[in-house]
Image (spheres, rainbow, N blue to C red):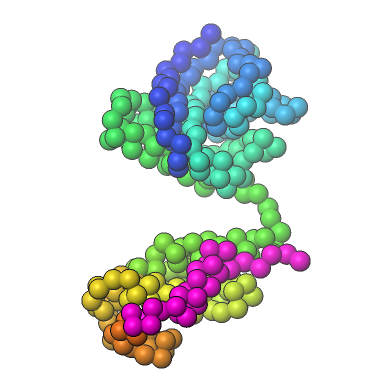
Amino acid sequence: MEKAYKLEFANEQTEGLALDCCGCSKTEPLHSFGPALKPHFLIHYVLSGKGRFSAGGQEYSLEAGDGFLIEPGELVFYQADGTEPWTYVWAGFSGSQAEKYVKELGLSSQHPVFSSNKREELYACVRNMMEHNTSGVANDLRRNGELAVFLSLIGEEAPVKETGGEDRANAYVKKAISFIQSNYCNPIKVTDISDFVCVNRSYLYTLFEHSVFMSPQKFLSAYRLTKATQLLQTTDIPIESIALSCGYNDAIVFTKAFKQMKGMPPTAYRKWARQNGGRRDKEKLLQIEDFIREQGIREKP
């Protein structure tokens, strides 16, 4: 037997990350679940007591501060200790990004166990999920927001999967390019990119030179000016607004950078592109967009 407080939600969201269920259980000695499977990702975190978890032919002894992952369709068994039964919280989730986040936490069916000293914070997340238990956009957003915090707390101390040097370098560049794609419209600098990726600026420079054959600064500028070129070709937005939309606070600085790349100022380029259809330049734009979509990563030979 167990004293369980749990909630299940009619989750129709397939994109992103969404909470399917959550709860808190205080179990009786030797209370067990399984062998059985779940239809979604499920993470349990032990608040007190002890127990054991079995999956993939492996058995793990767990205690307060430990947690475990159950993947969708995975046959598992877990049981409370006979003398010190555990109390735990859990969160079940799904969505197109669920598997990605689980992998980035370093968790999998081969490595399903983690430890965290964020006991109070993790419990508070689940409690808040349960408090916002009715349907409606506000509660849906709050529950899914708490789920994101729950996973982030685990991620602070969960094991990180080791990767080879080249794979790790490629991952840094991919993250940097993704950051640029999402933030080129803001006045970001290379230091902001390196801080986000968690590497120093000189190392990021080396990685970019090796992978995309240009510095991070040149890549950022090329991406911004590519977007500016598209806006000049397809809109009547004022030059000052295009500059701001592409991360330039100063229209004069933007105009100078654009002229360096195109050989003419933005106003003249807009007129030229419309008179000539911009065919030749569109081919160049497609090339750089394809290059960016491929993340600029050189594959292993």
Front in this rendered view, residue 47 or 225:
225
The residue drawn where x is 42% and y is 42% is: 149
The spot of residue 233 in percent (x, y) is 34, 75
The spot of residue 123 in percent (x, y) is 43, 31
273 displayed left or right of 293: left
Above/below status of 112 relative to 250: above
Q: Quadrant of the C terminus?
A: bottom right
| Prevailing SS of the magenta stretch | helix
Magenta-highlighted residues: 273-301
Is 183 within the magenta? no
The residue drawn where x is 66% and y is 68% is: 298
The spot of residue 38 in percent (x, y) is 57, 24
Report how many numbered discs are placed on residues in the image.
0
Residue 239 appears in the rendering:
yes
Residue 244 appears in the rendering:
no
Above/below status of 21 relative to 289: above
The residue drawn where x is 59% and y is 74% is: 212
Front in this rendered view, residue 152 or 207:
207
The spot of residue 39 in percent (x, y) is 56, 26
